[in-house]
Amino acid sequence: MLDYDTEISKLTPAEREGRAAVEEYEWCGCRHFFSWYDIDAPGLHAAVSKTQSGARLAREALDQGISQADYVLGIDFWLALRRKAEPWAWRMAGTYIDEGDYEDDEFVIRDCYVDAYISQEADRSPLLEKIIKTNPLLHAMICIETSRHLNAITRRPDAE
């Protein structure tokens, strides 16, 4: 079984820095739910660079000798993983909700519960089990995206 941290260490500097830009985009104030197919790497870079922390991330990448073109390729690497994870996330989020009445219980949407649920689902899906064993980066993105989807599904409009 491969390890997430080991796989991260194998990435290029641009790919490692691109992850932070994608995470910044996710948290930079997007209140509406979105698909990773809704934006491309240059657009994400431009959007994130308009935020204070996103501009800092881009500057730090340049300071490390990563060209803007390579930085955008690093962003594209993570966008591709997030896009691959989206169909899994929709499926996992739907079955997670179907198995119980979670709409009013935000506590069960904590990441550790979602991760455990996905591991449990791997017992029923040989492909998911293979992903968990051989592709820790995609497995992590499936978990993250499933949590994001669940939060969008269960978000109460009056809570925003």
Image: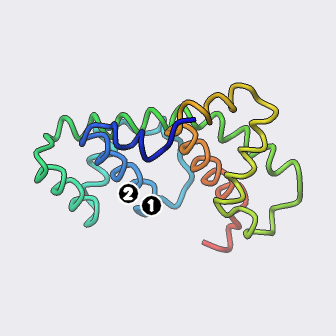
Query: CB under 8 Å between callouts 2 and 1?
Result: yes
Identity of the residue drawn at 60% across and 72% down: 160
Identity of the residue drawn at 48% across and 35% down: 81
| Relative depth, front residue between 70 and 103 | 70
Q: Which of the labelled discs sits on residue 24, or is there none?
A: 2
Q: Give the distance between the C-alpha atoms of the residues marked 2 and 1, in whole angstroms.
A: 5 Å
Whether residue 12 is situated above or below residue 25 in the rendered picture? above
Where in the figure is residue 140, as x and y percent of width and height? 55, 45
The quadrant where residue 87 appears: top right
Crowd around label 1: few <14 · some 14–19 · many ≥20 (10 Å): few
Amino acid bearing label 1: Trp
Q: Name the residue under label 1.
A: 27
Whether residue 145 is situated above or below residue 69 in the rendered picture? below
Q: In this view, does 13 lie to the left or right of 89?
A: left
The quadrant where residue 126 appears: top right
Where in the figure is residue 123, as x and y percent of width and height? 79, 35
Identity of the residue drawn at 28% across and 48% down: 17
The quadrant where residue 53 appears: bottom left
